[in-house]
Amino acid sequence: MAIYKRGKIWWLRFEFEGRRIQESAHCTNKHKAEQIEAKRKTDLAEGHAGLRRKAPTPRFIDAVHQFLEWSSFKHKPKTHESHRMHCETLKRFFPGKWVDQITPETVEQFRLSRLREKRRNAKDESTVSPTTVNRALETLRLIFNYLDMKSPTRKEMFSREEGQTRVVSVHEELAYFREASQPLRDIATIILQTGMRPGEVFRLEVRSLDFPHRTISNPTGKTKAATRTVPMTSEVFEILQRRSKEACGRWVFCSPAGPGRPEQPDRPIKSVRKAHDAALVRAAIQPHFRLYDLRHTYATRAAQAGIDVLTLSSLLGHTAVQMTSRYVHPTDQHKREAAQRLEAYNAETVFKYAESVSGSLQKPLQ
């Protein structure tokens, strides 16, 4: 019997079809471990149903390759690129693993380790966000679904994302824009004043700008609702007018080829992350906020200004108002003002009721 003891626990170790099987029997009794080993060999040889031989389980790296090849035809380019990025992370954590060796326990280890990792290229000590980890877990779940296997991910593994987004205060906004370089300053201003997604601003085309009507046409997006017309504020109007005159191609924000090199007119800018992080450090803003949080700030300020949720949902390009509610984060000041308005309304209602009752009592009988 190919079993051995490690501490108090018995382990299995044998080879099957060129694979080395080494796993815990999760028991301290030798006889039970031998039974578990025999059953494990039977399952591998005959399959759980005992009627036909199961298809051999692939290595995880091979499964990832197959999944990405399928994803390239099944998903949109941006979604496929996101899966590819998360697959690189997953391969780093599961090197040499066979798919059936990835268990809920190993996935939980991945989740905890990933949450402790420092964010790449971050100049502060910030770690990888729960949102990023959740996206990797979702990619892992899809890989198992593609293989028609039960996923080792569980609902409780997904970290809660509440609290990861926040509203930028006016003080932080002023400090940030004082330190922001170009084109970050213009891009951040457009996001903050229109609520557009960073990716939508990066891909702005000159032909999408309607200056006579002061609107921006967003022709594409991840949903049908993302295809929309966004009004310009006065400051955004001035920025886009200037940028359109300086544009060297179809894109409002062209991609720079490198330090000291001319811009590439055929490609839009892809990221301003380094400039954004540097501006946060120079402005001494703690904790740091994401560029995307400027969109949340727009939504919150719009709600505080009295814009109804249906209109705000349309401006943000959401398919449902439930999604819009996640973007609105009332501040303490806004809550206090709401409480004061309600208090004043209640007092006025009580006063009018008391006045009407008093008037009816004083009215002489006919």
Image: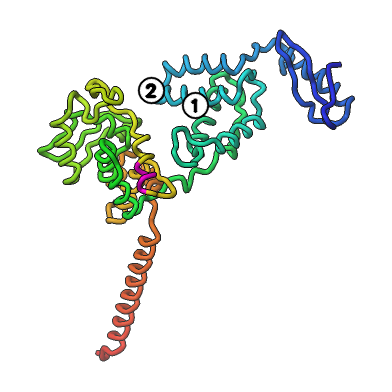
Q: At 47% from the left edge and 48% from the top edge, which residue is drawn?
A: 163
| Crowdedness near tag 2: few (<14), some (14–19) or many (≥20) residues, C-alpha within 10 Å | few
Q: Residue furthest top?
A: 17
Q: At 43% from the left edge and 50% from the top edge, which residue is drawn?
A: 286
SS at mark 1? helix
Q: Residue 72 at what x, y percent from top left?
A: 42, 17
Q: Is residue 189 visible?
A: yes
First to last magenta residue range: 279-283
User: As rendered, which of 120 and 130 lies closer to the eye?
Assistant: 120
Q: At 27% from the left edge and 33% from the top edge, which residue is drawn?
A: 227
Q: Quadrant of the rendered structure where residue 73 is?
A: top left
Q: Is residue 93 above or below residue 233?
A: above
Q: Return the residue at label 1.
A: 86
Amino acid type indicated by mark 2 = Lys
Q: Residue 204 at what x, y percent from top left?
A: 24, 31
Q: Is residue 8 left or right of residue 322?
A: right
Rounded to the nearest angstrom, the CA distance separating label 2 from label 1 is 16 Å
Q: Is residue 314 visible?
A: no
Which quadrant: the N terminus?
top right
Q: Return the residue at label 2.
A: 76
Q: Residue 107 at what x, y percent from top left?
A: 62, 31
